[in-house]
Image (cartoon, grey):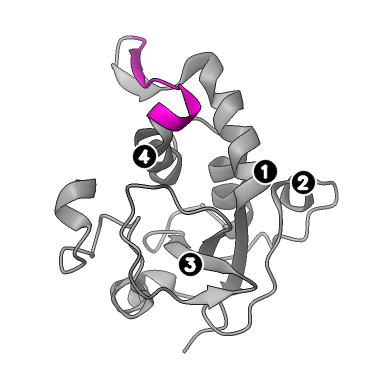
Amino acid sequence: MYKIMRNPRVFSREAVLARPTPVPDQAGMYGWYFKKIPKLVPMDYYCCHDDMALLYIGIAPSQAGSKSTLRKRIRTHYRGNCSQSTLRKTLACLLAEELNIHLRPTGQTGRLTLGEDEQVLDRWMEENAFVTWQVIEEPWAVEKDLIRDGNVPLNIQHNQEHRFYKDLR
């Protein structure tokens, strides 16, 4: 089992966005632990650490030849917008009522974003979302197994067997 699921060291939004950042500029996998689980997420057994639940696993890059890294991807999840981050879009959908936030299409592409509400999601993530990572040379080679073995309800890709998949989709 990878260390993102076994006694991980987790980092806050503030730590990840600090200069210098502890996040390596390398390929790898990352896991998101949450203090507060959005109320629509089923309360199954999750991999837990310090009273936080592992709800999402990601990789960077997603394929050979991509220039994405752990640093770029994790920072995008913490400070990007919903059109750049599936995790942020998922959280926005699950927390819309609780946080009074609303996804809306933007620009010519119609990609969904929260606009000014992105800052509301930033604050929620500051309080509740913590990330860990592990450097690995070819993360795309282990992604499917990681998601399956991690029992992570917020992943959509490679997660059709999870009982929350249909509701989340």
Q: How far apart are marks 1 and 2 (CA)?
A: 7 Å
Identify residue for label 2. 14
Magenta stretch bounds: 97-107
| In the displayed structure image, the side of residue 133 where residue 39 appears, left or right | left
In the rendered structure, which amino acid carries the disc numbered 1?
Glu
Q: Mark 1 falls on what kind of element?
A: helix
In the rendered structure, which amino acid carries the disc numbered 4?
Leu
Answer with the quarter of the image where residue 118 lies. Answer: top right
Identify residue for label 3. 54
Q: Estimate the x, y position of residue 35 in percent, counting from the top left.
A: 58, 57
> Compared with residue 146, is residue 118 higher up or lower down, i.e. above or below?
above
Q: Nearer the viewer, mark 2 or mark 4?
A: 4
| Residue 81 lies in the magenta stretch | no
Task: Of the two numbered discs 1 and 3 on the same chain, state the one appearing first in sequence.
Answer: 3
Q: How far apart are marks 3 and 4 (CA)?
A: 16 Å
Task: Of the two numbered discs 3 and 4 on the same chain, state the one appearing first in sequence.
Answer: 3
Identify residue for label 4. 94
Answer with the quarter of the image where residue 26 lies. Answer: bottom right
Q: Distance between the residues labelled 1 and 4?
A: 17 Å
Task: Of the two numbered discs 3 and 2 on the same chain, state the one appearing first in sequence.
Answer: 2
